[in-house]
Amino acid sequence: LAKTTQPISMDSYEGQEVNITCSHNNIATNDYITWYQQFPSQGPRFIIQGYKTKVTNEVASLFIPADRKSSTLSLPRVSLSDTAVYYCLVVDGRYSTLTFGKGTMLLVSP
Amino acid sequence: NAGVMQNPRHLVRRRGQEARLRCSPMKGHSHVYWYRQLPEEGLKFMVYLQKENIIDESGMPKERFSAEFPKEGPSILRIQQVVRGDSAAYFCASSPRDREAGELFFGEGSRLTVL
């Protein structure tokens, strides 16, 4: 399993764009990059997933360079409700289980 | 379409008692996963089940813990003779048979407190 490294915490203000970078130097050919969001006292929620280049949905964008050794989750114009822990995962497409690290605690202030 | 339902949401047990946590997957989902989250830590995988089968239990403690997903009814995570170190949030997730790799649907969790 490819190990991921992401900042422990980040601070931002309402209305700013937040970029959380995750490194995964040992990513394998079958691996996807997946991000989850977890609010306090709730279960994680799938945000976005990609294999290469750029993926965008209604919540976030995911940027993956050609070498796939890192990825960046971009949250446009964050609000207070985006305060949460964000997990970067590398998922083997052949297997079902997910391995979570400690994630990045994003704190959005007024 | 109801999400993953877990109950109880909160459970208090004394040391030595048994804890049973239940998980009903989303409608149409046949795969269930259990994770444990200790305070201030990330989620740790415990077990992956399909109906009547344990597929991967590599994260389950060797003693006192067991899980099942019967043909009918919810999946159950059972902890016998609980100890204080079992206090944690236990999350269940489900997925359909054919799914995007990495996309699991989590419940709200069951918070176990061992006195």
Image: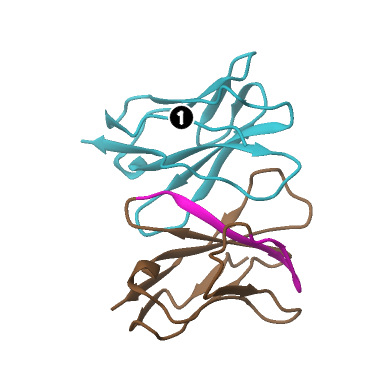
Chain colours: A cyan, B brown
Task: From this view, report whether residue B17 is shown above or below residue B91.
Answer: below
Which quarter of the rendered picture does the N terminus of chain B lie within?
bottom right
Q: Nearer the viewer, residue B85 or B87?
A: B85
Label 1 chain ID: A
Which residue is the extreme one toward the left? A110
- Magenta residue check for B42: yes
Q: Does any portion of residue B29 appear in the rendered image?
A: no
Determine the residue positioned at 68% across, 74% down. Answer: B69
Which quarter of the rendered picture does the C terminus of chain B lie within?
bottom left
Task: Indicate the position of residue B103 as horizontal and vertical percent values.
Answer: 63, 47
Q: Which residue is mark 1?
A: A5
Task: Indicate the position of residue B68 as horizontal and vertical percent values.
Answer: 66, 75
Q: Nearer the viewer, residue B114 or B81?
A: B81
Q: Does any portion of residue A92 appear in the rendered image?
A: yes
Determine the residue positioned at 71% across, 44% down. Answer: B100
- Magenta residue check for B105: no
Majority secondary structure of the magenta segment? strand
Which residue is the extreme one toward the right? B98
Q: Is residue B114 left or right of residue B52?
A: left
Which residue is the extreme one toward the bottom? B17
Q: Give the structural element (helix, strand or loop) at label 1.
A: loop
Q: Nearer the viewer, residue B31 or B47?
A: B47
* Amino acid at circle 1: Thr
Which of the 4 image quarters holds residue A21?
Answer: top left
Which span of residues is magenta-colored?
Answer: B41-57
Which residue is the extreme one toward the top? A66
Q: Is residue B10 left or right of residue A52?
A: left
Task: Indicate the position of residue A67 as horizontal and vertical percent values.
Answer: 63, 14
